[in-house]
Image: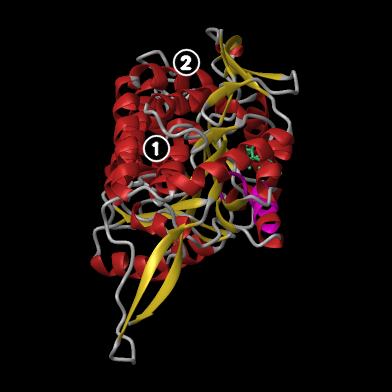
Amino acid sequence: MTHYLNYINGEWQESASNRKYQSINPANTSEIVGEVENSVAAEVDKAASYSQQAYLSWKKLAGAERGQYLYKTADILESRLEDIAETMTREMGKTLPEAKGETARGVALLRYYAGEGMREEGDVIPSTDAAALMLTKRVPLGVVGVITPWNFPVAIPIWKMAPALIYGNTVVFKPALEASVTAAKVIECFDEAGLPSGVINMVNGEGAEIGQRIVDNPQINGITFTGSDKTGKIVGQGALNRGAKYQLEMGGKNPVIVTKDADIDLAVEATISGGLRSTGQKCTATSRVIIDESIYSTFKEKLLEKVAKITVGNGLHPETWMGPSVSDKQLNTVLDYIEIGKNEGATLIHGGNRLTDNELDQGYFVEPTIFENVTTDMRIAQEEIFGPVLALMKVKDLGEALTIANDVEFGLSASIFTTNIQNMLDFIDDMEAGLVRINAESAGVELQAPFGGMKKSSSHSREQGQAAKEFYTNTKTVFIKG
Ligand code: ADP
């Protein structure tokens, strides 16, 4: 079994706590994937203090020089892609092809942000004083705290840490314990690339202790968080109280609308892919399917036929299409919501059970699950489940579909399947979501485009692409007169 220490000031260090966390395989709970430190809050303070010292020289480097470190990290991650992807599958359950795709995305993210080191960092603005030069300059925040979830254990840490670093910040990183071995392997790549000591630090441990200390540590000037809505509120409020900059990406309750003129086969494919891949454990996963009544039964039949063929199992097996829920806790949440749906009066038309045959009882497997006769006031239509559960809703027209689609507190991502241009335009205008996708699944994200939600899904900032610069820098307005 591999054991990973904390990474502080360029050294792998044991926690003073003497506590370890064992990360287990959700497809086979008797397998321990690895062990990490279960640290104490003082270790965050230590990491932040080294990170603050490292910041003073890291910010002085040219962006192009910082970029070289990211290019090197990308090459190392690429050379270890197979091993890291396999670790990801063992540790959090997604299928191996998905894990490889995610790791490759990590490589692409590093290269994208490496190039950012040579792009513009401000604007020249004409002064009313003709003899003066006025300009803006982007400057780093200082030490940035990075708190991440388990569902994308390579991509999310990298889409936060790479922009933080390229714009001149240093990092204290706390991954989710459920994916901490994968995260440690990512940090090994940065270490091997030779980043100066203290520029990147990782402290493993519980959210309430280590995450909370990142929120509260006065040396940490910016906090970027992806996770649940409940924790996001705690992080945002803590950061606001002490004047730290913060960015939150939280849940979704993402709809797909299927209009009467849709390509039904395409819509079925995308609903399955967007809703059930990664066992529904994506914040952009489709969870509500809002279908025009005139095509409802055709869509439902085709959907049921395809869902019946889904193979559930260990993500390392080539025939597996859908892996397990990440943990006992997550599995129970999914099973609880299935009960809630039944009690609320929704009709279960597929799945609904834990899977235990053929050794699946060794892991946290649940059937792909579909409800119909779901109404918008039901909890299964309002609350994020983070599991392979789809709620079908029948509507009269696009107007009603959009009203229902918007009738949730979240606003991350949404899709429509239609061939009608006016429907597309109405959807773009009226859908309250940060990502609106036409004839494409709700869960697609491209690293060079802004990513983030409306309403309760985010703190209204955006990640990835050029948008990342907004969070990871401050703007200084400079006025110069000779
Ligand atoms: P999930 O339900 O996906 O585990 P969480 O929001 O609980 O989502 O976790 C996301 C990240 O936030 C994890 O790294 C977790 O350890 C961390 N976290 C949990 N509680 C806190 C907290 N009070 N302060 C800061 N971070 C926290």
Colour mode?
secondary structure
Q: Does the magenta stretch include residue 444?
A: no
Q: Give the range drawn in magenta.
A: 223-237
Label 2–label 1 contact, CB within 8 A: no
Query: Which image quarter is the N terminus in?
Result: top right
Outermost residue on the front side: it is 482
Which quadrant holds the C terminus? Answer: bottom left
Q: Of the residues under marks 2 and 1, which one precedes in the sequence?
A: 1
Of helix, strand and loop, which one carries label 2?
Answer: loop
Q: Which mark is residue 314?
A: 2
Q: Where is residue 288 in the image (x, y as percent from the top left)?
A: 49, 49
Q: Quadrant of residue 257?
A: bottom left
Q: Residue 72 carries which label?
A: none
Residue that label 1 marks: 272
Q: Which residue is drawn at 39% across and 37% down?
A: 272
Q: How far apart are marks 2 and 1 (CA)?
A: 19 Å
Indicate the position of residue 260 as horizontal and vertical percent values: 32, 57
Residue shown at the point (56%, 26%) measured from the top left: 180
Which amino acid does the dot numbered 2 rest on? Asn
**Horizontal side of residue 30 vs 191, given as left or right:** right
Marks 2 and 1: which is nearer the front?
2
Q: Residue at 25% of width from left, 63% of height from top?
A: 420
